Image (tube, grey):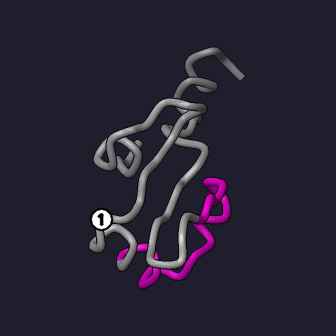
Amino acid sequence: MSLFGAVADAAPYDTVVCSDASGERRLTRSQFEKLALLDRVRLLAGGEIRFFLGAREIDKSVALARR
Protein backbone atom coordinates (compact mmCIF):
# COMPACT_ATOMS: atom_id res chain seq x y z
CA MET A 1 0.00 0.00 0.00
CA SER A 2 1.28 3.45 -0.84
CA LEU A 3 1.65 6.20 1.70
CA PHE A 4 -1.23 8.02 0.00
CA GLY A 5 -3.45 4.95 0.42
CA ALA A 6 -2.59 4.72 4.11
CA VAL A 7 -3.46 8.39 4.65
CA ALA A 8 -6.70 8.07 2.70
CA ASP A 9 -7.72 5.08 4.84
CA ALA A 10 -6.92 6.82 8.13
CA ALA A 11 -9.96 7.40 10.32
CA PRO A 12 -10.69 10.99 11.38
CA TYR A 13 -11.51 9.72 14.89
CA ASP A 14 -10.80 6.68 17.04
CA THR A 15 -12.97 7.26 20.13
CA VAL A 16 -16.51 8.52 20.72
CA VAL A 17 -17.72 9.81 24.08
CA CYS A 18 -21.49 9.81 24.65
CA SER A 19 -22.96 11.65 27.64
CA ASP A 20 -26.39 11.31 29.20
CA ALA A 21 -28.05 11.50 32.61
CA SER A 22 -26.37 8.25 33.68
CA GLY A 23 -22.86 9.48 32.86
CA GLU A 24 -20.34 9.06 30.06
CA ARG A 25 -19.81 6.07 27.81
CA ARG A 26 -16.68 5.66 25.69
CA LEU A 27 -16.88 3.73 22.44
CA THR A 28 -14.27 2.81 19.89
CA ARG A 29 -14.91 3.87 16.32
CA SER A 30 -15.87 0.29 15.50
CA GLN A 31 -18.33 0.07 18.39
CA PHE A 32 -19.95 3.38 17.40
CA GLU A 33 -20.29 2.36 13.76
CA LYS A 34 -21.93 -0.93 14.81
CA LEU A 35 -24.73 0.92 16.63
CA ALA A 36 -28.05 0.95 14.83
CA LEU A 37 -28.38 3.98 12.54
CA LEU A 38 -31.30 5.31 14.59
CA ASP A 39 -29.19 5.19 17.77
CA ARG A 40 -26.33 7.09 16.08
CA VAL A 41 -28.74 9.72 14.76
CA ARG A 42 -30.31 10.16 18.22
CA LEU A 43 -26.87 10.69 19.76
CA LEU A 44 -25.93 13.22 17.11
CA ALA A 45 -29.26 15.07 17.26
CA GLY A 46 -29.10 15.20 21.05
CA GLY A 47 -25.72 16.90 20.93
CA GLU A 48 -24.33 14.66 23.66
CA ILE A 49 -21.56 13.11 21.60
CA ARG A 50 -17.91 14.05 21.12
CA PHE A 51 -15.31 12.56 18.76
CA PHE A 52 -11.60 12.19 19.52
CA LEU A 53 -8.44 11.24 17.70
CA GLY A 54 -6.10 10.34 20.51
CA ALA A 55 -6.56 13.06 23.12
CA ARG A 56 -7.64 15.73 20.58
CA GLU A 57 -11.34 16.49 20.15
CA ILE A 58 -12.49 16.41 16.52
CA ASP A 59 -15.37 18.51 15.18
CA LYS A 60 -18.45 16.41 14.33
CA SER A 61 -18.49 17.63 10.74
CA VAL A 62 -14.89 16.50 10.27
CA ALA A 63 -15.38 13.18 12.06
CA LEU A 64 -18.43 12.25 9.97
CA ALA A 65 -17.36 13.64 6.60
CA ARG A 66 -17.28 11.16 3.74
CA ARG A 67 -13.81 10.37 2.50
- The residue identified by callout 1 is 47
Tell me the crowding category of disc 1: few under 14, some 14 to 19, or many 20 or more residues within 10 angstroms, Cα based.
Answer: few
Residue 46 spot, x, y in % from top left: 30, 73
Q: Residue at x 38, y 51 (%)?
A: 64
Range shown magenta: 25-41
Picture residue at 46% right of the left edge, 48% below the top = 51
Residue 49 pos. (x, y %): 41, 60
Viewport quadrant of the N terminus = top right
Question: Image quadrant of residue 63?
Answer: top left
Q: Position of residue 50 (x, y in %)?
A: 42, 52
Residue lying at 27% horizontally and 72% vertically, measured from the top left: 45
Residue 33 covered by magenta stretch: yes
Name the residue type under label 1. Gly
Q: Residue furthest right?
A: 1
Magenta stretch: dominant SS? helix
Q: Is residue 27 magenta?
A: yes
Q: Does 40 sit above or below residue 52?
A: below
- Which structural element holds mark 1? loop
Q: Is residue 11 above or below residue 45?
A: above
